[in-house]
Amino acid sequence: MNVKQRVEKLREQIRYHNYRYYVLDSPEIPDAEYDRLMRELQTLEAEHPELITPDSPTQRVGAQPLEGFGEVRHEVPMLSLDNAFSDEELAEFDRRVRERLEIDTVEYAAEPKLDGLAISLLYEDGVLVRGATRGDGTTGEDVTLNVRTIESIPLRLMGKDYPKRLEVRGEVVMPLKGFRELNKRQQAEGHKPFVNPRNAAAGSLRQLDPKVTAQRPLEMYCYGIGLVEKGELPDRHSAILARLRDWGLRVYKGVTTVRGLDGCIRYYNTMEKRRDSLPFDIDGVVFKVDSLDEQQRLGYVARAPRWAIARKFPAQEELTRVLDIDVQVGRTGALTPVARLEPVFVGGVTVTNATLHNEDEIRRKDVHIGDWVIVRRAGDVIPEVVSVVKDRRPKDAKPFVMPKKCPVCGSDIERVEGEAVARCTGGLYCEAQRKEAIKHFASRRAMDIEGLGDKLVEQLVDEKLVNDVADLYSLDVDTLAGLERMGRKSAENLIKALEDSKHTTLERFLFALGIREVGEVTARALARAFGTSDTKGMSDKKRVRTDIDRLAKATQEALEAIPDIGPVVAGHIVKFFKQKHNRDVISKLLDAGITWPPQEVAAAQPLQGKTYVLTGTLSSMTRNDAKARLQALGAKVAGSVSAKTSAVIAGEKAGSKLAKAEKLGVPVLSEDDLIKLLEQGEQGT
Ligand code: IVH
């Protein structure tokens, strides 16, 4: 094979693997192999520049920045879509279509409505020659150099039977994961973050320097065609999309056909449920009469076809006003500014508050009291203020000032250097922190006190019936039954739930105490380390006190020696037990009768502290089984080899990891060695 043939062969292979990766979502080769093909092509082209063609996969970036974008006139105008905001409006659309076509049931193509920006791609003889934005529908901007950098857009079509000139239309989007990463980078580099993925996609495509676009995570999904010259296309929209896919263009895999209004409603409901788990934003679904002949009979009104409609989802972003900014105090004293909003219906619910996270965030977004803001509520995520509409700022808008004293208890507020959050220093003196501490103590994963909800906790603290968590256990039925909105039966149930909660486990109890940064995992580690397992005839009462005493006396060093406990958490634990009022509350809780069973003897962990890497195929067990058994013995199983790896376990056809182990001098074990290691460890337990 001569160089020219090799170059062509490589290009063909790379195009094929791009297609497997981007269009079929089913790569055939590992990334490393793809990179190798690409590098070989780059090397050959560097040695033989005369062989470089504009549609070579190496030629995505490379051009110099532009002075400005040229204009592109769309030979076939790029239209927009009519919207339906309810099932009734959708039914109206379907009725009009049926009446005009004089048929009973319409077959529709059903697609997601991607929230990005519309792009037209022109292919001549299968080669991408132009990319353009929609602009006003008649004239757009020439963004050819930028669209060439998007890897899901083929520079050359696959197959042979494509029209001589073919204009493909679709949406360029920025997937959510890429959007979040980009915004992190923007902030780290001191640039303004983008408000949403659509703006980020638009901003990225309208860069004069294609090198910038190339670094942005953009993807294109195709949803139709424009100009077609010299070529035959199928007579149904769905079949055209399938054809585009065959030519190597990306079409979203959830595109399908449905029958009649019922089919449309079902598709809408399914997609609405899936909306939050999709990798990109969609703002509705689109229904298009599938038959092109029927489309033609229906025609157009003004700037939208009569044969298509966008059924929009409820908006996830809305405009409203900030009436005030309050500061909430959390369990650990963290102060969170919260915007009180003029009620607004967004994401399917009425929103009246939105978190502003912290002071820096307010400065960054420049939120004033009185401002008009965009509020976003997506899925079950708590509502947040996305941005301020600056040119609507009223004259009397007031900047936010973080209070110097806790708004609840008046204690000083401290903001540790380098931390974003400000905290109230009042501790359990602060009523807000106390309420939150009690709510946490009662919660399901802590002491699990059924019937002790947030509202009741607030009522109990407000009425001074409960001052700390231990006071809960002194409540009686009469006192509770005397509370507003509390019947005798509920009072009795709550007392029973409190009694039941006294039988707990050490790890739940430690978690319930609400020590800073001690979550369930840390609580479990502490219980394992300090719980008594060998009771030696000790009474239960004595044993539970012993457990707590040992933990309370543990030094910073002793705590840091426990797996997964770092210096910061250890510091919080030491500080917690140093405070007399914390020890008193625990004492009161134990007096009230809280108890837990002896600690189960932890399985021996002979491989604690070791890290293994598995590579190649094992014959006597799967890699997952081997991993689980190693982990049960306390070992870590990592995905890549480093100098810290204890050993690499190499099965059949072990590859680069084995080579790396040899290079780093990391011991290599065979499958037989592994079996011996596991058996020895497991016998020891
Ligand atoms: S079809 C004549 N299909 O929505 C039909 N548009 O409001 C023209 N869009 O400018 C468009 N997903 O940017 C169509 N599956 C889809 C779409 C879609 C998103 C956008 C497109 C268009 C706008 C119209």
Image (cartoon, grey):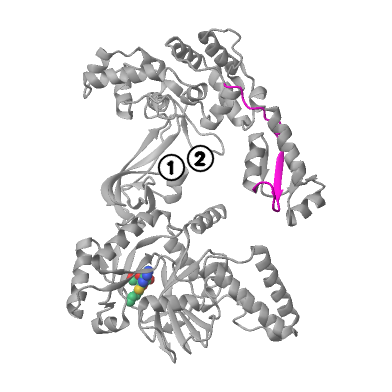
Q: Residue furthest bottom?
A: 230
Residue 514 in the image: state x and y as whole percent.
47, 26
At a point 53% along the width and 12% down the height, the residue shown is 545
The local secondary structure at tag 2 comes to loop
Q: Left of 562 or right of it: where is 161?
A: left
- Overall secondary structure of the magenta section: loop
Disc assigned to residue 420: 2
The N terminus is located in which quarter? bottom right
Label 1: few (<14), some (14–19) or many (≥20) C-alpha neighbours in 10 Å = some
User: Is 51 situated left or right of 21 in this image?
Assistant: right
Residue at 43% of width from left, 32% of height from top? 404
Name the residue beneath numbered marker 1. Answer: 357
Amino acid residing under circle 1: His
Q: Position of residue 324 (x, y in %)?
A: 31, 42
- Classify residue 369 by image quadrant: top left
The amino acid marked with disc number 2 is Ala
**First along the sequence among labels 2 and 1:** 1
- Quadrant that contains the C terminus: top right
Residue 61 makes an appearance in the image: no
> Dots 2 and 1: beta carbons under 8 Å?
yes
Q: Position of residue 145 (x, y in %)?
A: 54, 77
On screen, residue 185 versus residue 115, left or right, reads: right
**Magenta residue span:** 600-622
Looking at the image, the residue that sits furthest to the front is: 620
Q: Is mark 2 within 8 Å of ligand 1?
A: no
**Considering depth in this image, is 341 or 176 the residue closer to the camera?**
176
Instruction: Judge by depth and name the residue closer to the eye, 296 or 516.
Output: 296
Q: On the rendered structure, is 369 left or right of 46?
A: left
Q: Which mark is residue 409?
A: none
Q: Is residue 613 magenta?
A: yes
Label 2 CA crowd tier, 10 Å (few <14, some 14–19, many 20+)? some
